Image (cartoon, rainbow, N blue to C red):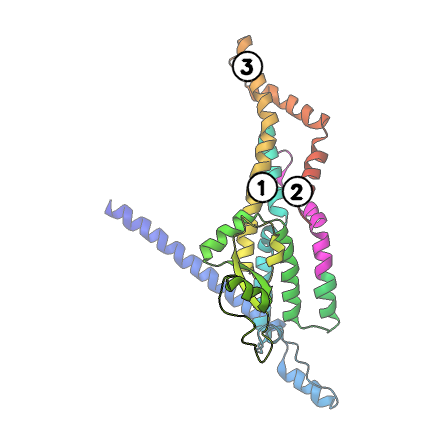
Amino acid sequence: MIKEAIKQNGRLFLRFIVSFVITCLLMTVLCMTVSALSADPDSETEVLAENPGTERVDSSLMKELIGIDGSQTLEVILIVTILSVAPSFLVMLTSFTRIVIVFSFLRNAMQTQSIPPNSILMGLSLFLTMFIMWPTFMTINEQAYQPYSKGEITINEMVDRSADTLKVFMLKNTSKNNMQFFLDLEGAAVYETETRSAEAAAAETTPETSIIDPDFIQPIEPIEDITARTPVNLNETENELTEYTDQLGLETVIPAFILSELTRAFQMGFMLFIPFLVIDIVVSSTLMAMGMMMLPPSMISLPFKIMLFVLVDGWQMLVGTLISSFNV
């Protein structure tokens, strides 16, 4: 037993050493590649010396983002990091989640195994996502990217405008219950601002039977309007979530939106299962009545499911329902 344990530990240690060496080699290759792609400061100095009228161009992306100048190596690492998390943003901040889950439920309900293939479902989900998100993307292009490309706004303003546009789309498709749930977890709340005049506030605070004459004391200067902030329970208000866009941050909107998308996708998946489940029950009962115990019911029910789905034009109905379920 001791020898086997020592042998197993030796294998684990060997795997760790091999993984560590490979990681170090990959980091070395990455640093060498980035250094090769970086501009040579000596060559830049020589070019500036040959052209006295030319000014040094400072186009550091790090400086525009956080106000700190960085080398091109850091910029390349930052760009690689952004590209690595881009698929997560595409999946979690758009309509892609609901669409791909509903398609997966459809394939499981029909019991067609790997038909349609994953590549087909992913491609259709991406194109439907582009179709649904196109107005949002156009708004981001007109209000954020085009002004930035013309030099009218900074990159920070471009990011803020893009985030606000995307936040409006997510709030339109987020349930109030989920949003209130995350606000309660965070210990935060949204407020309604109510502006009342001084006369109205005095009428509310002064009873009609008061013996104090309101005309006895006259203020020297007019009293400004009183602004009151009242906390709001989103489950009880009739206002839309988009009215509280300025008060809701992305750290709350994003998880609430994802939870809402999962809830709606599972609800649609449940509705998809019902007609196919009825077919399975009818086929199973028929086979039991005929005494065909050894015949798999799925082999008989599958053609009827496909026929039903084709006769009712299922793909068009499903895609139309998915598109109409989003508030754009």
Q: Which residues are magenta?
A: 112-140
Q: Secondary structure at mark 2?
A: loop
- Neighbor class of circle 3 (other Cα within 10 Å; few <14, some 14-19, many 20+) is few
Q: Quadrant of residue 320 in the image?
A: top right
Look at the image and tell me whether residue 294 can be seen: yes
Q: For the residues carrying marks 1 and 3, which lies nearer the camera in this image?
A: 1
The residue that label 1 is drawn on is: 264
Task: Give the side of residue 234 with respect to residue 160, left or right.
Answer: left
Inspect the image, locate mark 3, and give the three-letter code of the amino acid beneath it.
Answer: Ser
Q: Position of residue 237 (x, y in %)?
A: 57, 50
Against 10, is 149 above or below?
below
**Residue at left offset 68%, top offset 36%:** 318
The residue that label 3 is drawn on is: 285
Against 311, is 157 above or below?
below
The residue that label 2 is drawn on is: 325
Q: Quadrant of residue 292 in the image?
A: top right
Q: Earlier in the sequence, mark 2 or mark 1?
A: 1
Against 303, is 174 above or below?
below
- Neighbor class of circle 1 (other Cα within 10 Å; few <14, some 14-19, many 20+) is some
Q: Secondary structure at mark 1?
A: helix
Q: CA distance from mark 2 to mark 1?
A: 9 Å
Q: Earlier in the sequence, mark 3 or mark 2?
A: 3
Task: Give the side of residue 34 with respect to residue 146, left or right.
Answer: left
